Image (cartoon, rainbow, N blue to C red):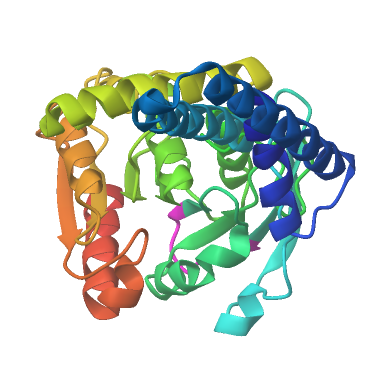
Amino acid sequence: MTAVAAGLGLAAPRLAKDDAGWLAWLGLLALAVGGSAAAWCAWRVLHAVRRRWWALAVPALLVVTYLVLWTVAQGFVAGLPAHPSLGSRTPADVGLVHQPVTLRTADGVDLAAWWVPGEADAAVVLLHGAGSTRTAVLDQAEVLASGGYGVLLLDARGHGESDGRGMEFGWYGERDVAAALDFLEDQPGVSPDRLGVVGMSMGGEEAIGTAGADPRVQVVVAEGATHRVAADKAYLSEYGVRGDVQRRIDWGTYAVAGLLSPAPEPPPLRESVAAAQADGTPTPMLLITAGDVETELLAAELMDRAAPDAVDIWTVAGAGHTGGLRAEPDEWARRVLAFLDAALA
């Protein structure tokens, strides 16, 4: 079953994103070979068990199959992710004047971005979620630019037109965002002490992580941020035994991803939230959660306990994951711009 899970994790996301390279073919081979081996093993097990015990043996085999598929496949998806293509949309499609730029990270990876100059001397880095690119946050960029902010839309490494190998839990985020902040500091008219980071899902988690590691981040807006490492899943304890079982399953997923990826494992989100306040200058954070995704609020409340004076939580009723702007466009714009204005004034 391990081969089946690995094959599923390699092949499915790549074929879905038209990234049919050698890893996709390797995944299909693993699916075929592993599936045949798993079917033979299951038949041998059932053949060795008396038929009256099949009522127990069959569910046990199904449970083992599910656990292996979930932990290993998800680990492969995160640790060896597909490289999503950028797509055809640009900031011009939402009425923004922009220029393409290339950034170099401290570890030598070239990142692609769009720079939208602002009218004020404040600027923000805008980060997309896992498995997507900067085109996914064009609507958010339009709102931020309407508030006068310069906006740098960044493709995470291994995504869009950026080089490097991706990591879908965002473990490279601190390095990538540091390069983005370097760029903003060098822009004429941008004040180095008026920089923020806005991120969706994985991008929100990267924003929080960077705030804990880089004092240049003055404010964070993170939507749909829930977990980067196994310790972040502590909010699952709210579900009792079911949550504790799920935490142990998820620990296996993170372990597999960590083995497959050379990315440095970051600290838990709540530790990054606390670290962002440790220099004596609070870094305000607005955590936006989806009303239709209960775990997002639980994760935000866990982070809030690390620095209650610095964290604000807004739950958008009726919104799905990172769907706050779609569900409440006027209120999203009002709240986010007011939060950034207050922090960067």
Name the residue nearer the viewer: 72 or 99.
Answer: 72
Q: Image height check: is 237 above or below 195?
A: above
Which picture quadrant has residue 238?
Answer: top left
Task: Tally the marks.
Answer: 0
Residue 120 at x, y percent in the picture: 43, 63
Name the residue nearer the viewer: 167 or 111.
Answer: 167
Residue drawn where x is 41% and y is 19% of the image? 251
Direction from residue 129 to residue 246 in the image, left or right: left
Q: Residue furthest right?
A: 22
Name the residue nearer the viewer: 15 or 55.
Answer: 55
Query: Magenta includes 215?
Result: no
Q: Is residue 212 visible?
A: no
Residue drawn where x is 16% and y is 36% of the image? 310
Residue 158 at x, y percent in the picture: 72, 42
Magenta segment, principal secondary structure?
loop
Name the residue nearer the viewer: 294 or 126.
Answer: 294
Residue 299 at x, y percent in the picture: 23, 37
Residue drawn where x is 73% and y is 45% of the image? 11
Residue 209 at x, y percent in the picture: 41, 30
Q: Image height check: is 35 above or below 137?
A: above
Which picture quadrant has residue 166?
Answer: top right
Direction from residue 62 to residue 343 in the image, left or right: left
Direction from residue 229 to residue 165 in the image, left or right: right
Residue range of the region highlighted in magenta in the rendering: 115-123
Query: Magenta includes 117?
Result: yes
Direction from residue 205 to residue 74 in the image, left or right: right
Q: Image height check: is 318 above or below 65?
A: below
Q: Residue furthest front?
A: 51
Q: Name the quadrant of the N terminus.
A: top right
Q: Is residue 143 visible?
A: yes
